[in-house]
Image (cartoon, rainbow, N blue to C red):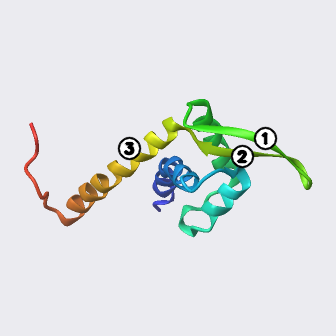
Amino acid sequence: MIEGWITQLRKGLLEYCVLLVLRRGESYGYEIVQALKRIEDLAVSESTVYPILGRLRAEGFLKSRDVPSDAGPPRRYFALTPRGKVRLAEMNAYWPMLTKALNELKSGKPEREPQT
């Protein structure tokens, strides 16, 4: 029914969700995936999160470092860069405006006159 729409909505929000997880500090990929999996409605997998981490790093929003692991291959830890912190602050500022706009549309009446 609306599965396609839900999938696209989740994909659009995952970048924001990854940045929110990393605002608490450095974390490696598996930990980030597990933190997001705890929120059942996000329905994330490694195959969706790792490309986002790579893209955010390539765009300068995240930095990473590899740390040797006794339990297998090195772990890649990710952290917000100053640019990533700005991006997250911008997303945090926009979120209330977005939810307000959606609530206005759902109620059937805008709370303010349209701007021209």
Residue 116 placement (x, y as % from top left): 9, 36
Residue 113 placement (x, y as % from top left): 7, 50
Which label belongs to residue 100?
A: none
Mark 2 sits on what residue? 77
Residue 107 placement (x, y as % from top left): 19, 66
Q: Earlier in the sequence, mark 1 or mark 2?
A: 1
On screen, residue 108 versus residue 100, left or right, reads left
Q: CA distance from mark 1 to mark 2?
A: 6 Å
Assess disc 3: are there few (<14), some (14-19) or many (≥20) residues with their C-alpha within 10 Å of its C-alpha. few
Q: Give the secondary structure at mark 2.
A: strand
Q: CA distance from mark 2 to mark 3?
A: 24 Å
Q: CA distance from mark 3 to mark 1?
A: 28 Å
Residue at 70% x, 58% y is 31
Residue at 30% x, 58% y is 99
Q: Give the secondary structure at mark 1.
A: strand
Q: Give the secondary structure at mark 3.
A: helix
Instruction: Pick whichever, 49 or 20, lies toward us.
Output: 20
Mark 3 sits on what residue? 90
Q: Amino acid at mark 3?
A: Glu
Mark 1 sits on what residue? 66
